[in-house]
Image (cartoon, grey):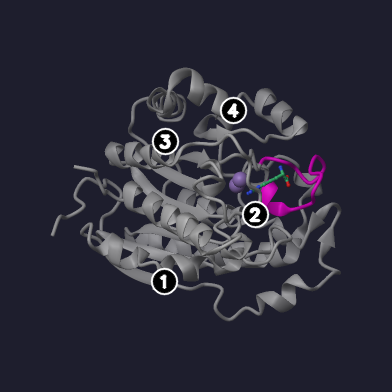
Amino acid sequence: MPSPTHYKYAATKNLSLVLAPFSGGQGKGGVEDGPEYLLEHGIEKHLKSLGWSTTISDPLKDDDLAAQKSDLSDVSGKCKRPKMVGQATKKIYAAVKEAAHKGDIPVTLGGDHSIAMGTIAGTLDKHPDACVLWIDAHGDINTPSTSDSGNIHGMPVSFLMGMEPEACPPDLKWVPNCIAANKIAYIGLRDVDAEEKKILKDHNISAFSMYHVDKYGISKVVEMALDKINPNRDCPIHLSYDVDAIDPLYVPATGTPVRGGLTLREGLFIAEEVAETGLLCALDVVEVNPALAAHDVHVLDTVSAGVSIAKCALGETLL
Ligand SMILES: NC(=[NH2+])NCCC[C@H](N)C(=O)O
Ligand SMILES: [Mn+2]
Ligand SMILES: [Mn+2]
């Protein structure tokens, strides 16, 4: 069996699979079933076959998430369900932080993208110099005041950057201001709200849209993104992967699909390139929503793309 030696930040050679069956960051049901489908599709076995050992942690297991989601009084300004999101992400934070401090690589299975507040804060607690590669059709950098939807899965980056402290709901005040603008880069963008574009510009955040992928090719784009946030290739990389970055032709079962996305191979190539650096310190796979599939093939396509992202990031190669 191969051994994943080429992972500088995996002292234990163990992956901590952190289950985050959470949907409170947006309105649609079904994304809470993502972890279960990824597990049923054999994600653990596949990762073991790459030479990893695995442990599972389930930080939300005691929570009645359905009851919390139906609590209509949980609002703060425009933010929907801030208490639910704040409490769940804090537990995910604790699980990721513990795994990272042990020397494991935390692999968090979502769940909607609001959970990245927990995962990235957990990573940064162990690796304060880590950078974040955010793969997404969306910017997820709305603030409570710029968001049109009020869905917190469209805001995690702004909270992690401490952007609007005065509007931060009390239950999200625990989120540390832990990512600097020069430590995050996006790839795959194509549905960025007007005010998010302004935020990206004003903070000079590296953002590569589908236009850049078409213009330069995915290989050059990954290189340019890493040159911006990790120029000497000496910092740990947290890969936060929203499956909607990949075109809905390949990944249809997701909550906010946007046409004109990455091909499946471009999407997997990003994960392969990150693996190749040896610097991966944490991975999130989010926004798999089996309930939004029109038929079984859609479920299978989406879930197997999620599993493939994890395999590629954790050392699978084509040859
Ligand atoms: N993680 C996601 N899929 N985010 C979609 C966000 C969509 C939109 N920009 C919003 O703020 O609501
Ligand atoms: Mn998205
Ligand atoms: Mn996202």
Q: In the rendered image, which residue does mark 1 sit on? A: 40
Q: Is residue 128 left or right of residue 21?
A: left
- Say which quadrant the N terminus sits in: bottom left
Q: What residue does disc 3 label?
A: 266
Q: Answer left or right for 14 relative to 40.
A: left
Indicate the secondary structure of the residue bearing disc 2: loop
> In this picture, which residue range is highlighted in magenta?
141-155
Q: Residue placed at 56% from the left, 57% from the top?
A: 118
Q: Residue at x 43, y 23 (%)?
A: 217
Q: Main secondary structure of the magenta part?
A: loop
Q: Residues within 10 Å of mark 3 (few under 14, many from 20)?
A: some
Q: Residues within 10 Å of mark 4 (few under 14, many from 20)?
A: some
* The furthest residue to the left: 1
Which label number is shown at residue 205? Answer: 4
Q: Say if the magenta span includes residue 245.
A: no
Which callout, 4 or 2, points at the residue further toward the start of the chain?
A: 4
For the residue carrying disc 1, how many other residues have a C-alpha within 10 Å: few (<14), some (14-19), or many (20+)?
few
- The answer to whether residue 126 is visible is no
Marks 1, 4: nearer the viewer: 1
Inspect the image, locate mark 3, and give the three-letter code of the amino acid beneath it: Glu
Element marked by disc 1: helix
Three-letter amino acid code at disc 2?
Answer: Gly
- Residue type, numbered disc 4: Ile
Residue 28 lies, in percent from the top left, at 70, 62
Q: Residues within 10 Å of mark 2 (few under 14, many from 20)?
A: many
Mark 2 C-beta closer than 8 Å to ligand 1: yes
Residue type, mark 1 in image: Glu
